[in-house]
Amino acid sequence: MIPQDRAARLTATYHATLARFIARRLDDRDAAEEIARETIERVAVEDDEEGERSTIFAAAINLARSEDVGVPRAQPRLALMRADVETDIVSHLEATHAKRPAEQAMARSALETLPLRDRDALLMREEGLRYDEIAAALEMPVTAVGSTLARARRRLMEAYEALLNAPEPA
């Protein structure tokens, strides 16, 4: 049985952040809402409140991975064409580079080229998780988080710049 007071607290505290994180990862708002709800339900039954945020994000990553199974990473997504892609990309790129829908689609494409671990680390940091929480969620040493984030940022910018500088199709 799910403790309702804990579930309500977890929902109030983490649902919006978790749903945004998953939506950025999967590019599917409906699936993100469902995974966020299911994640909170699963974590609410656990008694351990220490490391709660990293536990929630780790559970969400595992559930999101099950959504990814069987979907080739290189497969183009029609979701890039959506008008509301503006709200789904990394806010840093929104603020600095993504002024138009075409640039937003390129930013989303650049993000999708990253390995899952790098993408997850960037998105978790964007959601405000500390290094120790990211390390726990991704099952990596805390000392590796900084280099993982730096490498992911570099790869993201390189991929974005490559897409930005690519010749337009005729």
Image (tube, rainbow, N blue to C red):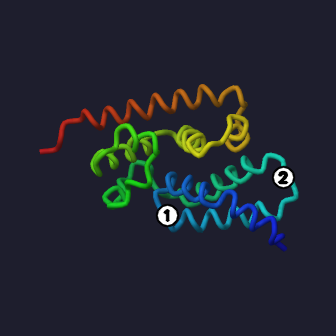
The image quadrant that residue 120 belongs to is top right
Find the distance from the CA under tag 1 to the CA under tag 2.
Answer: 28 Å
Query: Could you tell me if the residues under marks 1 and 2 are in contact, i.e. CB atoms within 8 Å?
Result: no
Question: Tag on residue 49?
Answer: 2
Q: Amino acid at mark 2?
A: Glu
Of the 4 image quadrants, the one containing the N terminus is: bottom right
Upstream in the sequence, badge 1 or badge 2? 1
Q: Which mark is residue 97?
A: none
Number of marks present in the image shown:
2
Q: Residue furthest right?
A: 47
Residue 121 x, y percent position in the rendering: 59, 39
- Local packing at callout 1 (Cα closer than 10 Å; few below 14, some 14-19, many 20+) is some
Q: Residue at x 72, y 30 (%)?
A: 142
Q: Residue at x 68, y 37 (%)?
A: 130
**Residue 124 in which image quadrant:** top right
167 versus 87 height, above or below: above
Q: Which class describes the residues within 10 Å of circle 2: few (<14), some (14-19), or many (20+)? A: few
Relative horizontal placement of residue 81, taking residue 117 as reference (left or right): left
Q: Position of residue 7 (x, y in %)?
A: 76, 67
Give the SS element for disc 1: helix
Q: Classify residue 84 as left or right of residue 17.
A: left
Q: Which residue is mark 1?
A: 29
Q: Which residue type carries mark 1? A: Arg
Q: Is residue 59 above or below residue 169?
A: below
